[in-house]
Amino acid sequence: MNLLGAFSKVSEGIYCTDAPIVCFSHLRWDFVLQRPQHLMQRFSADRQVFFFEEFIPTDHHLAYLEIHPFAGTAVKAIRPRVPHGWSEAQREAALAHLLDDLLALHGGRQPILWFYTPLMFAFARHVDAAAVVYDCMDELANFKFAPPQLKAMEQALLARADVVFTGGYSLYEAKRDRHDNLHAFPSSVDAHHFRTAREGQSAPTDQAAIKGPKLGFYGVIDERLDLGLIRDIAAARPEWSFVFLGPVVKIAQDDLPRADNLHYLGQKSYAELPSYLSGWDVAMMPFALNEATRFISPTKTPEYLAAGRPVVSTPITDVVRSYGDVPGVFIGDDAASFIDACAKALALRQSSDSWLETVDALLARSSWDDTARQMRMLIEHTMGGPAPLSPEVAGQHAARTQGQPAPHA
């Protein structure tokens, strides 16, 4: 029996061998490939996964569901459509009914409810679930424009959840007194995908014409980036080119620093990222130090390293804790020190690749396959499954919760 299929309803002693997963996410499936997509893609190999997204207003007079299949995955994105002008109470009632209809169409089996946003718990709390999982990837309450009810809904979700995962050690420490079955799972990496950047690839058309040493960033461009720092380092080093890939969200285009050596190339697909990384000399994480970044554990850190690129970051707590002593990772907390760190990273890039041996040994312990497998075992153990927690997974969890690299699987 697959471990994820061994979830039990403790009170009834029933094993749910075919329970679908309904994953509630504030991110759309086809927006930016992050932790939810990595994990749900793997769980969909042996069961139905519905990726339940935020509602979209419609001019229709009735609420309804759109089901979106995507090529290359068995996951189905669920996009609720709710009429304009409905009150919050009407909307929540409609979403609850639509969720019930979705489950009924799948045979009425008890689902596994997996939450990335506590807000959706409001209309899903009535469901008789085989298990309730809260995968706290970010401290969403600290993000710009966060709804005021988010903290209260998170508390309600924590009270109901059977198991809670966090996207990094800082989040684990912040929430470990709020749930008695909490486990830290920092960012993992698809090392094989990003390692192709080391082989040298044809330069993408929009990057090919950019001259000089290239220092790049990819990801959502929002309030988490230090725009002042970016402006200052670009002005101080006009001979360097700074490349940014990703959508601009929650900030105005006019707020972005502008200079001849600053290049915003827009959002790229996950498949395209290695080709862009292949042309970079250094990868950057110029994050602001604010409430929105207080608990982040950037997935791009191990991805940049897997691509063979030195990384320069501002002193994000989880980056310093997990990677501060790793060869190829440099930290700068202001413009002068960030520029100095970039210069050191450029020098390393031009030296031998011997530093990558330590990097590759570290990344070998950080695959998404291992993370998904460990989560399966922890949930089975939590729900009273037939097998005890293996010494391997117990040891890896103990290492994670102490802020140390997990032993190699």
Image (tube, rainbow, N blue to C red):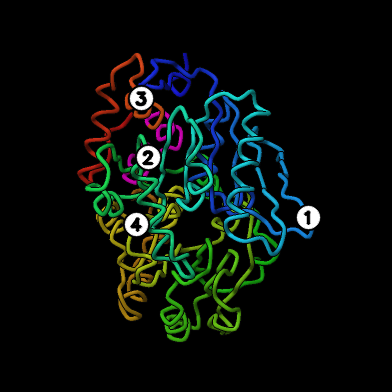
The image quadrant that residue 102 belongs to is top right
Please tell me the numbered disc located at residue 328.
4
Q: Are marks 4 and 1 in contact (CB under 8 Å)?
A: no
> With respect to residue 382, does 241 lie above or below?
below
3D distance between C-alphas at marks 2 and 4 = 42 Å
At horizontal 56% and vertical 53% (from top left) the residue drawn is 27
At horizontal 40% and vertical 69% (from top left) the residue drawn is 287
What residue is shown with label 2? 160
Image depth: mark 3 or mark 2 in front: 2
Earlier residue among tags 2 and 4: 2
What residue is shown with label 1? 61
Earlier residue among tags 3 and 4: 4
Amino acid type indicated by mark 4: Gly
> With respect to residue 397, does 345 lie above or below?
below
3D distance between C-alphas at marks 3 and 1 = 42 Å
Q: Are marks 3 and 4 in contact (CB under 8 Å)?
A: no
The image quadrant that residue 285 belongs to is bottom left
- Majority SS type along the magenta span: helix
**Is the C terminus in the top left, top right, bottom left or bottom right quadrant?**
top left
Q: Residue 263 or 136: which is nearer the viewer?
A: 136
Earlier residue among tags 4 and 1: 1
Image depth: mark 2 or mark 4 in front: 2
How far across and down, in percent of the image, does residue 378 sit? 34, 29
Q: Secondary structure at mark 2?
A: helix
Amino acid type indicated by mark 1: His
What residue is shown with label 3? 383
